[in-house]
Image (spheres, rainbow, N blue to C red):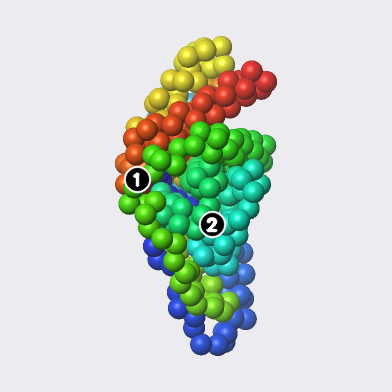
Amino acid sequence: MSEQNNISCACEGGAPKAARGGTGVGRILLLQALAVAAWYVLYLQLLPFSNWFAYGLLGLDPASHLGSAVQFFVYDTPKVLMLLLLVVYGVGILRSFVTVNWTRAFLAGKRESAGNVLAALLGVVTPFCSCSAVPLFIGFMTAGIPLGVTFSFLIAAPMVNEIALVLLYGLLGWKIAALYFATGISIAVVAGWVMGRMRLEPYVEDWVREIRAGEAADEPHMTWKDRFTYAIESVRDIVGRVWKYVVLGIAVGAAIHGYVPEGELAGIMGSEAWWSVPLSVLLGIPMYTNAAGVIPVVEALLGKGAALGTTLAFMMSVIALSFPEMVILRKVLKPRLIAAFIGVVGCGILIVGYLFNAVI
């Protein structure tokens, strides 16, 4: 997906050069522990502060549309941004251990079925995204990784990113987060396997297939101090890219929360309307947002009566099938392969939507 849909990678920044020595690590750990404690105390104050701001300071009626919308916005905006800061920093440290060359070497030579599973799981935690999709795709192809395995990775990387998992857990609970993880991984694995069976290699752009695989560039060794620095740079890069989309998504969610009547969405996005799932997928494709920005909208939709399967289908189409993502992939894929990609992934999302509408 495009840059804004990439909340899961600090693109093109690479790992910082290794610093000399590991001095000051203990002091950094102490400061981080104090920062986490302060973060937790502040997090606990968000709900009472939002109630005081909306109903006390502004004097809005809690039963009014405006009062409900303002309280939702004032509460969710700092909550989502605080969760975003914490998880991006933690994942930044994790990603400092997982380099591009390591990922290529890990996937190269694996049997295709096992490769699909491993590639999808790696897509959740590795520092790749739509803005690095083209160089990543080239690197995988030249390393001899099967096309289907490559697509399992490219689907999972934006769709099942760790930030979306943490935000879903924080806003909607572990069951919804686990459901999102399981279905997203399943779509990535199955879609990659199906595309591998379709023998679509001739529809990769010719110039990509003509590139010879080269030796992987040496990557500097990183000390713990380097890893902390890398995590801080990830926070600056990622949060700096996506915060405005997060605020916009929360504003949309606040409007839905405050002004859409309770249960009104059940008739439009409910499980009884057979057309709600394909409609939600079609609505998600042209949207210009990211996972962090769409999750507050998902929270509001579910709260107003939208069916879980329909809402998940909408979220996954926004993240995995956005138009900007297709524009980026067009640099390395011919139109027929892009059409196959959209068709296979779209069918997987539809199945997920209908399945969970039927059983939940």
Measured along the vertical axis of the image, is residue 104 above or below residue 246?
A: below
- Residue under circle 1? 205
Q: Mark 2 or mark 1: which comes first in sequence?
A: 2
- Residue under circle 2? 126
Horizontal and vertical percent position of residue 21 = 55, 88
Q: Nearer the viewer, mark 2 or mark 1?
A: 1
Kind of residue at badge 2: Thr
Q: Residue at x 45, y 37 (%)?
A: 200
Q: Residue at x 43, y 31 (%)?
A: 340
The number of numbered badges drawn on the structure is: 2
Kind of residue at badge 1: Glu
Mark 2: secondary structure: loop
Circles 2 and 1, Cβ within 8 Å, touching? The answer is: no
Report the disc number at residue 215: none
- For the C terminus, the image quarter is top right
Give the alpha-carbon distance from disc 2 to disc 1, as whole Å: 25 Å
- The quarter of the picture where residue 66 lies is top left
State whether residue 345 appears in this view: yes
How packed is label 1: few (under 14 Cα within 10 Å), some, or many (20 or more)?
Answer: some
State whether residue 248 appears in this view: no
Measured along the vertical axis of the image, is residue 242 above or below residue 255?
A: below
Q: Residue at x 58, y 53 (%)?
A: 122
Q: Residue at x 62, y 81 (%)?
A: 26
Seen from the viewer's position, the closer of residues 115 and 358 is 115
Horizontal and vertical percent position of residue 164 = 53, 45
How packed is label 2: few (under 14 Cα within 10 Å), some, or many (20 or more)?
Answer: many
Horizontal and vertical percent position of residue 238 = 42, 57
Seen from the viewer's position, the closer of residues 221 and 230 is 221
Horizontal and vertical percent position of residue 61 = 45, 30
- For the N terminus, the image quarter is top left
